[in-house]
Image (spheres, helix red, strand yellow):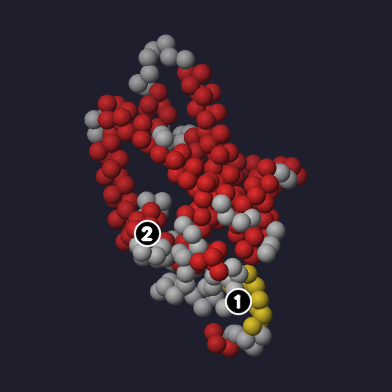
Amino acid sequence: MESFVPLSLVCSEVPWKSCGNSWNTASCSEAWGNFTSNCTSIGQPLNCTIKLTSPSEEFWERYILAISNGVDDPGNIRLPLATTLLIAWTVVYFCICKGIKSSGKVAYFTATFPYLILLALLIRGATLPGAVDGIIFYLKPDFNKLLEPQVWIDAASQIFFSLSVGLGGLVTFASYNKFHNNCERDAVVVSTINCLTSLFGGFAIFSVMGFMAHTLNKEVSEVVSSGKQRCKQSCLQGALPLKLERRGPERR
C-alpha cells in the first residue's frame, strides 16, 4: 500500500484532495465533522445529524483498502495494489540477488531516504496552522494510559514491527559480521536509533494532527484515533497543500 500512494503524486491533482471521485460517498466533504442540515437530498430523515468524512479518509478506506463488510466478504483483488506489490518485490529481488555485495550498497539509500521523507513531512507539517498544538499534545503524554493493557500491546506491536524482530532480517545480516564483532553494542545502537526515529516521526505526524484539529475547531485529543490508519491519513493530509487550508472551514 505504501508503494501505491506515491504513484498518485504524479497526478495533476492528488485524488485525496477533494470529493467527487467514484469512491466518494454523499457524506464526503472538505468541511469535516457533524452538523445538522436538510438531509432529504441524500435519503436521510429531515434535519438529521450527518457525520462527514474527509476526502483523504475515504480515499484510504474506500479506494486503497476497499474495506469489505466483514471477514465473510473477502472482496476482490485490488489490481493497483497487486501491481505495486509485484514491482516492490521485483526491486527487492534485484537488490539482494548478489548477496551482501548488492544489498550493502542499496542499504546506503534505504537507510537514509526515509529520514529525508520524515524531514520533508515535518517541515511541511510545521508550516500548517495549529501544528504547535499537535506537538504540545505529543510532548505531554497522559501517564494514566500506562494502566491500560491495550497501550502496552500497541507499544509491543510497534517495537516488534519497527525492529523486524522475528522476521529474520537482523539475524541474516548479523551472520555477515566478523566472528568477534561486538553484537551487544550493535543491538544497543540499533534499538536506540529505532526509538529515536519513532520519536522523530511522531513530530511529523502530530504536527499534521494539530492542523486537523485547528481546521475542525476541536481539541487534538478529539482528532487523534488509535491505529496506523489515522497516521497514514495524516501523512496524506500533510503531503501537499490542501484546498481546505487555503479557503478555511466551509459548510457544504
96 on left or right of 158: left
Task: Name the spot of residue 124 as percent of width and height, x first.
Answer: 51, 50
- Under tag 2, what secondary structure? helix
Tell me the CA gap for discs 1 and 2: 27 Å
**On the image, numbered disc 1 is attached to which residue?**
251
Task: Name the spot of residue 111 as percent of width and height, x first.
Answer: 41, 34
Do the residues under discs 1 and 2 have CB atoms within 8 angstroms? no
243 on left or right of 94: right
Number of other residues with Cα within 10 Å of mark 1, as a class: few under 14, some 14 to 19, many 20 or more: few
Task: Name the spot of residue 132 as percent of width and height, x first.
Answer: 65, 49
Rendered residue at 42%/11% (across/down): 180
* Residue type, numbered disc 1: Arg
Relative vertical location of residue 126 with respect to residue 171 in this rendering, above or below:
below
Rendered residue at 44%/75% (across/down): 20
Which one is nearer the viewer's eye here, 4 or 29?
29
**On the image, numbered disc 2 is attached to which residue?**
8
* Residue type, numbered disc 2: Ser
The answer, for residue 81, to whether it is visible in the render is: no
Q: Tell me which label, 1 or 2, sits earlier in the chain.
A: 2
Badge count: 2
- Under tag 1, what secondary structure? loop
111 on left or right of 31: left
Q: Kindly give the residue lying farthest to the right in the view shown.
A: 144
Relative vertical location of residue 212 with respect to residue 142 in this rendering, above or below:
below
Q: Residue 108's image quarter?
A: top left
Look at the image and tell me in which quarter the N terminus lies.
bottom left
Rendered residue at 32%/56% (across/down): 82
Rendered residue at 49%/75% (across/down): 25
Q: Residue 90's image quarter?
A: top left
Which one is nearer the viewer's eye here, 169 or 18?
18
Number of other residues with Cα within 10 Å of mark 2, as a class: few under 14, some 14 to 19, many 20 or more: few
